[in-house]
Image: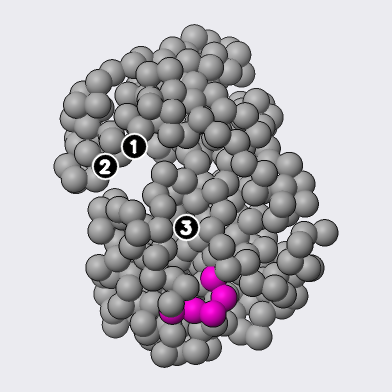
Amino acid sequence: MTPYGSPSPAPGPVLVTGATGTTGSRLVVRLLRAGHPVRAAGRRAAPVAGAEPVAFDWSAPATHDAALDGAAALYLVPPPGATDPADVMLPFLDRARRAGVRRAVLLSSSLVPAGGPATGQVHRALPGHFPEWAVLRPSWFMQNVTGGHPHARSIRGDGVLTTATGRGRVAFIDADDIAAVAAHALTDPVPHNTDWVLTGPQALSYDEVAALVSHVAGRPVRHRAVSGAELRARYARDLPDAFAAFLAELDLRIAGGAEDRVTDSVARVTGRPPTSFAAYLRANAALFEAG
């Protein structure tokens, strides 16, 4: 039992942006299983079993009104790679308020406070737009070492995990735990009206992460520590330079201890402890296979 009561079906669909993404796809499944109507938004309106597909693109305002029509709540995933998502997200929030949406939940980041860079501007604006709101500020995803993230590709291909974090530690979190908190924030009878810093149960250095992955994968994986400038250049091969610089700066903040913390937010909201990194790796051992 959470302090917000048992979730009850919303009076209208929950609009999930980024519905095929890391947290959005997991959230859609959770909401549908709990009996909530879901509108799954994406650029191509890809069908999700049981959900209403709708075409949606942050950079195409012509897609926004249809996505919002009749929606009771919103899950807001910023446009990927955007260094200033407020440019497109704040006008959308204005539309949503005029459309009668009462509740919104924003996916942000643990190192980005209200009023800070990137999603921090959207975070600051959210309470002024909706009477019911929450901001989720997760630490780094466990999925970064198993999915399509550069870390995961490098682990599978070279057995190397490259960061500028030095000996800094992070309490990595499973995206499924983020989705569980999001489902409550969107549907609990009592609105959360707060921001949640979400972490896993243990802060680990990337040296410790590499050792855990080595054990589960059954082959050597090492952490390669580099400078912030080298990491920025590495990211800039695939990302806009400004976003690459932003990501490198986050690594340097981790090196300084900014992420060396554990919170009880997942347990407080969901009533159960978050998944440990070791348990997550064991459950996903097959994903470390090369290729």
196 relative to 113 in the view: left or right? right
Find residue 220 and report its horizontal and vertical position in percent: 49, 9
Q: Mark 3 belongs to which amino acid? A: Leu
Residue at 64% across, 56% down: 181
Find residue 130 and report its horizontal and vertical position in percent: 49, 79
Mark 1 neighbour class, 10 Å CA radius: few under 14, some 14 to 19, many 20 or more:
some
Q: Which residue is mark 3?
A: 107
Q: Nearer the viewer, mark 3 or mark 1?
A: 1
* Magenta-colored stretch includes residue 132: yes
Query: Relative to 115, is 99 above or below?
Result: below
Q: Are marks 2 and 1 in contact (CB under 8 Å)?
A: yes
Q: Earlier in the sequence, mark 3 or mark 1?
A: 3
Mark 2 neighbour class, 10 Å CA radius: few under 14, some 14 to 19, many 20 or more:
some
Q: Which residues are magenta?
A: 129-133
Q: Are marks 3 and 1 in contact (CB under 8 Å)?
A: no
Q: Earlier in the sequence, mark 2 or mark 3?
A: 3
Give the number of the disc on residue 246: 2
Residue at 60% across, 13% down: 215
What is the CA distance from the residue labelled 2 to the residue labelled 3? 17 Å
Residue at 56% across, 63% down: 194
Q: Mark 1 belongs to which amino acid? A: Leu
Give the number of the disc on residue 250: 1
Q: Quadrant of the C terminus?
A: top left
What is the CA distance from the residue labelled 2 to the residue labelled 1? 6 Å
Q: Nearer the viewer, residue 67 or 11?
A: 11
Find residue 46 and report its horizontal and vertical position in percent: 46, 66
